[in-house]
Image (spheres, rainbow, N blue to C red):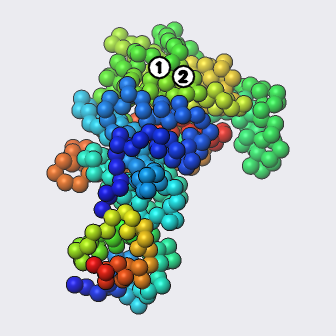
Amino acid sequence: MQRSIVPLSEVPRARVEDYLRASTGYFRARDSAAIGWKYYDAAFNRGRERGFAWVKDGRVRGFIGIVPGLVARGSEVAALHWTCDWGLEDPKATPGIGILLLRRVIATGEHTVTMGGNANTRALVPRLAARSFEGAGLHLWRPLRTAALLHLAASRAPVLGRLAPTLLGKLPLPWFAGRASRHVRVRVTGGVAASLDALFEAQRPAAWTARYDVPHLQWALERCPGIVSGSCYVAGDRGPAAGAVLWYSEAPAVRHVRFALWTTPGADDAAEQVVGEVIRCARSRGGALISALVGRWDTAELGVLRRAGFFPRAGPLPLYVFAPAGADVDGRLDAGLGAGLGGINYLATDLAQRFRGTSG
Amino acid sequence: MKPIVQVIAEQLRVPEARVHDELAFGAIPEWDSLNHVNLMVALETEYGVTVDEDHMVELTTVRAIRTFIAAR
């Protein structure tokens, strides 16, 4: 089996673009620069395979994307794959091809992780996964302007949703910045701050945790077409003690700001200052609401955000871990992931760019 | 070699009495994408045939599977 499922690098780019534009809402609404950024960014790819395609009669008819990622525990670092853009041109007429695409990724020999997915995915994937975690990723949400509340109310009274982009939606909601620490200075930069690499290095988590680096964030946020990003961090003696990146899409009339937060042990105060600055930045840039996706294992970040007034909204996302078969399995990682995966945020897979109205 | 009906029933985890020529992918909850792949692998193992992706998307009824195996 799997003669016509081939690595993305072996498929003519024009065929891939035809398929993605026809089958994926995100790419349908954008020009080819978006596909170039996502799958053909040489600086990010560094020769790594970025997906697999099912090619039939010279056309791509099914696809699964890979976002190369890292996880860390203590000083150990391991590679894994996040999946994205997994789909088929005609799922009803091509049974099993989606499963073969996923198995092709798993067969590459690294652990593979999927987050979220539609009802079909959630019914099938747990039977394939080595580990399934329902409710792994929590959307935490905080309205900043009346537009966010009008969107919330629109499910019961649609007319209110139409008011969100008007002047009525621009009214800022009360916000108390909280106490500012005289000992903590938050630095704010445009784009992804290079200093964040020192924060990622310093984290040294006790359990396996998604690990990022500045090149990954520069690809995910700085070079993603239509996204504006910034960084906030608190510098300690040996680099940042806590930090965040925030970003938003330039397009929508009602601006939804997202962010990802990282802390180091014992740096709750610094993290609270960072979150306060993130909220301040989001408000000053016209944000109507701000949200973060946090893993249920990330208790420090969850505590900081709840104290800052964030509350859960929308359904939590499941997380599925697929272990490669055979002798190449990383036993340390395989056993460790049984306890979950820390460090989940919107940067996992390609959730960062998928803004859906104000749903979080 | 097991009868085709037995192989299909085992992979779909349904009684053999429910496996008839008109039974098709998606007609019962047990014949979903994942079990379809498992069924194709079982056909390869049991009958020594090669089932590629083109075959897989065509072998969506018991009758089609029976015809495919008989022709090999």
In percent of the image, x 62 and y 19: which residue is there? A280
Residue type, mark 1 in image: Val
Work out whether residue A63 can be spotted: yes
In the image, is A22 to the left or to the right of A173? left
In which quadrant of the rendered view does residue A288 lie?
A: top right
State the quadrant of the N terminus of chain A: bottom left
Q: CA distance from mark 1 to mark 2?
A: 7 Å
Chain ID for label 2? A
Q: Position of residue A238 (x, y in %)?
A: 33, 13
Comparing A188 with A91, the one in front is A91
Disc 1 vs disc 2: Cβ atoms closer than 8 Å?
Answer: yes
Q: Position of residue A134 (x, y in %)?
A: 45, 53
- Say above or below: A94 vs B65: above
- Say above or below: A224 vs A179: below
- Kindly state the secondary structure of the residue where label 2 is placed: strand
Q: Residues within 10 Å of mark 1 (few under 14, many from 20)?
A: many
Comparing A269 with A50, the one in front is A50
- Say above or below: A178 vs A64: above
Which residue position is annotated with label 1? A192
Chain ID for label 1? A
Which residue position is annotated with label 2? A229
In percent of the image, x 44 and y 23: which residue is there? A218
Q: Position of residue B1 (x, y in %)?
A: 22, 84
Work out whether residue A113 can be spotted: no
Q: Residues within 10 Å of mark 2 (few under 14, many from 20)?
A: many
In percent of the image, x 62 and y 23: which residue is there? A282
Comparing A134 with A309, the one in front is A134
Of labels 1 and 2, earlier in sequence is 1
Q: Position of residue A63 (x, y in %)?
A: 44, 50
